[in-house]
């Protein structure tokens, strides 16, 4: 579970670090900019809970079918892009 929607403004310098542990494999590291939730998909979701007591929240689906959506958020790739943009 991620923070309620009303707690944070999505912005480039707010990131989520995810470490995926799978038996028999090296841990996989991901770095997801919060702005990725501006275009939700099957992995990065927005839960609005319309008509319910729970407040809306950002979410991430970590089940196997959703893993391909994380491919673009490899830690090294995103960290390098942040480093490059900081130099510009």
Image (cartoon, rainbow, N blue to C red):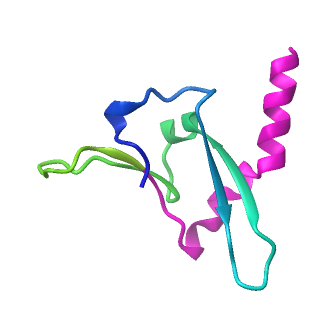
Residue 17, x across and y down, in percent? 64, 49
Q: Relative to 37, is 78 on the left or the right? A: right
Q: Residue furthest bottom?
A: 24
Q: Is residue 66 magenta?
A: yes
* The N terminus sits in image quarter: bottom left
Q: Residue furthest top?
A: 88
Residue 3: quarter of image? top left
Give the answer, above or below, for where 62 lies relative to 31: below
Residue 66: quarter of image? bottom right
Which residues are drawn in magenta?
59-88
Residue 32, x across and y down, in percent? 64, 44
Between 81 and 1, which is closer to the camera in this rendering?
1
Q: Relative to 45, is 81 on the left or the right? A: right
Magenta region, main secondary structure: helix
- All told, the count of numbered labels is 0
Which residue: 36% across, 32% down?
A: 7
Which residue: 13% across, 50% down?
A: 53
């Amino acid at each position: 579970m991620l923070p309620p929607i009303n707690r944070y403004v999505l912005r480039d310098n707010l990131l989520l670090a995810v470490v995926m542990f799978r038996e028999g494999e090296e841990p996989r590291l991901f770095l997801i900019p919060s702005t990725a939730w501006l275009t939700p998909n099957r992995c990065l979701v927005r839960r609005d809970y319309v008509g319910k007591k729970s407040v809306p929240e950002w979410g991430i689906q970590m089940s196997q079918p959703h893993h391909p959506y994380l491919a673009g958020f490899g830690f090294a790739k995103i960290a390098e892009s942040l480093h490059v943009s900081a130099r510009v």
